[in-house]
Image: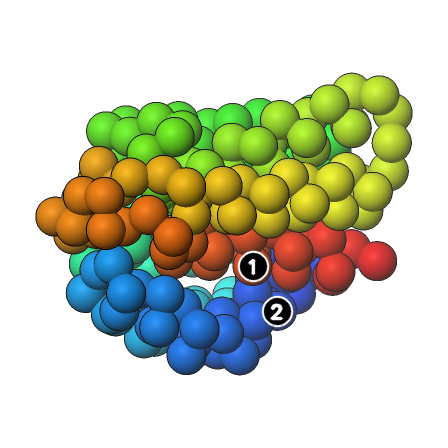
Amino acid sequence: MITGALLVKILKNIAIKIHENKQLLTELDAAIGDGDHGINMNKGFTAVSKKLDEIKSHDCGEILKTTAMTLISTVGGASGPLYGTAFLKASIVAKGKNELDKGTIIKMFDEAIKGIVMRGKAQIGEKTMLDALIPAYEALKESLEQGEELSTAFHKATDAAYEGVQKTKDIIATKGRASYLGERSIGHEDPGATSSYLMTKTIADTLI
């Protein structure tokens, strides 16, 4: 079970994790994109962290919606609309809930991915954040449906996301700025997949 207070803690920890990895994400993006993924994500989640200090509600839907709107308004490039849409879709599932049970968390993750697919017109295997998120979701869902603890499920999701990130090195980019490189994008891991992995890992670490 994830309470509103724990959800805020998770999001604040994500902001810390993104800040710690700002340079890494920027370097990954510089190799195949605009070189601003780390800078943009850090800016967005720093703003989210400050915004969460103002929230008095324990409504998980409101917390996630605030996160979504902050990312959309502060993160440049494709990341803002994509992650913003993901959090917005998740917020609809969580609306009015002060606690998130396992079934709700599975549904939130599913809707978040559907939002990214819709917004980005992408699918798994195209060197995007979906290459980390979809395996993570599948591992999480399988673990929770087998009755395992939430922390265990998110650690399995983290492992799956990491494997997904590694696989992006072998994929020719077909989306975004990286697609201009064609075969030269091979050998580089996708920065969006990496930031998605970092978020998943932060959730798992916070739940310990």
**Residue at image mark 2:** 13
Numbered circles on residues, count? 2
Residue found 36% across the figure and 65% down from its top: 28
Residue 166 vs 139, above or below: the answer is below
Residue found 55% across the figure and 52% down from its top: 197
> What amino acid type should be assigned to the residue bearing mark 2?
Asn
Residue found 19% across the figure and 65% down from its top: 34
Residue 203 vs 52, above or below: the answer is above
Circle 1 SS class: helix
Horizontal relation, residue 158 to residue 131: left or right: right
Q: Check the picture and name the quadrant holding the N terminus.
A: top right
Mark 1 or 2: the one toward you = 1
Horizontal relation, residue 196 to residue 175: left or right: right
Residue found 78% across the figure and 55% down from its top: 207
**Residue at image mark 1:** 198
Q: How far is disc 1 from disc 2 in space, using C-alphas?
A: 10 Å
Labels 1 and 2: the sequence-earlier one? 2
Q: What residue occupies the far left of the structure in this picture?
A: 180
Point out residue 187 in the picture as x, y percentages from the top left corner. 38, 52
Horizontal relation, residue 172 to residue 99: left or right: left
Point out residue 25 in the picture as x, y percentages from the top left corner. 40, 68
Point out residue 71 in the picture as x, y percentages from the top left corner. 33, 59
Point out residue 38 in the picture as x, y percentages from the top left corner. 36, 71
> What amino acid type should be assigned to the residue bearing mark 1?
Leu
